[in-house]
Amino acid sequence: MEESDTIITLIGTRLAKVGNEFIFKNAAKECQPCKFNKTCLSLNPGSRYKIVNLRNSAKLECFVHDSGVLAVEVTETPIRIAVESRKAINGSKIVYEPPPCNNQDCENYPICRPSGLRAGDKFSIVEVIGELSEPCRKGYAMKIVDVKR
C-alpha cells in the first residue's frame, strides 16, 4: 500500500480499532465549531473506509463522541453495488443510478441501493464480481461490481 492511499482522520475511541470499517455519512451539526473538524471531515460522504493504523496520539475531546476521539489512518475500500449489466466494465466510470425499484423486501435491495449512496454519485468500477445471488424480481439485467470514488 502506498503512503498516498492513507488518510489521517479522527474517530471515536470506542470505534478506533484496526480492521474496523465504516461508511462516512456526513458532518454532524455539532462538528461546526470544533477546531479539528477539517481533519474529521476530509472524508468523502458515502464512501467506505477501513482503519489500517492507530496513530500514537493523545485522546482529544469531541462534541459528538462522549469518550473522545483518536487519530487513525484509513484507506477507502470498494463499495459493492449492483449496476445494469451493460455498464459493468472493469475500469469504466459510472454515475450511480439506483434501479427504479423500491421493494425493500427484496433480497437484492441492500446491494441495489447501498446505504450512504445518492443518485448522481460518480465512481470507477474496480472489479466486476458477477451475477446477483437471486434474480431480479423486476427482471432488470444487473451485475455486482466493486466501485471507488
Image (spheres, helix red, strand yellow):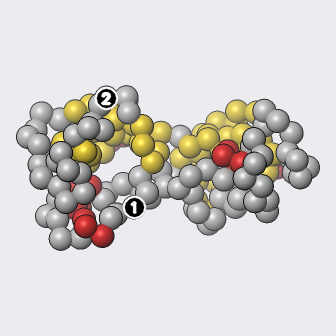
Residue that mark 2 sits on: 18
| Measured Cα–Cα span from mark 2 to mark 1 | 22 Å
142 sits to left or right of 112: right
Can you tell which mark lies on residue 40?
Answer: none
Is 10 located above or below residue 14 in the figure? Answer: below
Question: Which residue lies at the image location 34% right of the left edge and 63% below the top edge?
Answer: 27
Q: Is residue 71 visible?
A: no
On screen, residue 65 above or below 102:
above
Report the amino acid beneath label 2: Val
Which SS class for mark 1?
loop
Q: Secondary structure under badge 2?
A: loop
Of labels 2 and 1, earlier in sequence is 2
Residue 67 percent location from the top left of the image = 18, 45
Q: Kindly identify which residue carries mark 1.
A: 26
Residue at x 79% of width, y 51% of height? 84
Depth check: give the residue in front, 94 or 44.
44
Asked if the residue at tag 1 contacts the one at tag 2, i.e. Cβ–Cβ closer than 8 Å, the answer is no
Three-letter code, disc 1: Asn
Picture coordinates of residue 99, whole percent (x, y): 76, 58
Image quarter hosting the N terminus: top left
Which image quadrant is residue 28 in? bottom left
Measured as percent of width and height from the top left, residue 60 is found at 11, 49
Q: Position of residue 110 (x, y in %)?
A: 66, 46
Does residue 6 appear to the left or right of 35 in the view shown?
right
Residue at 25% from the left image edge and 45% from the top image edge:
12
Q: Nearer the viewer, residue 14 or 10?
A: 14
From where the camera sits, is residue 104 visible?
A: yes
**Residue farthest toward the right in the current orientation of the protein:** 139
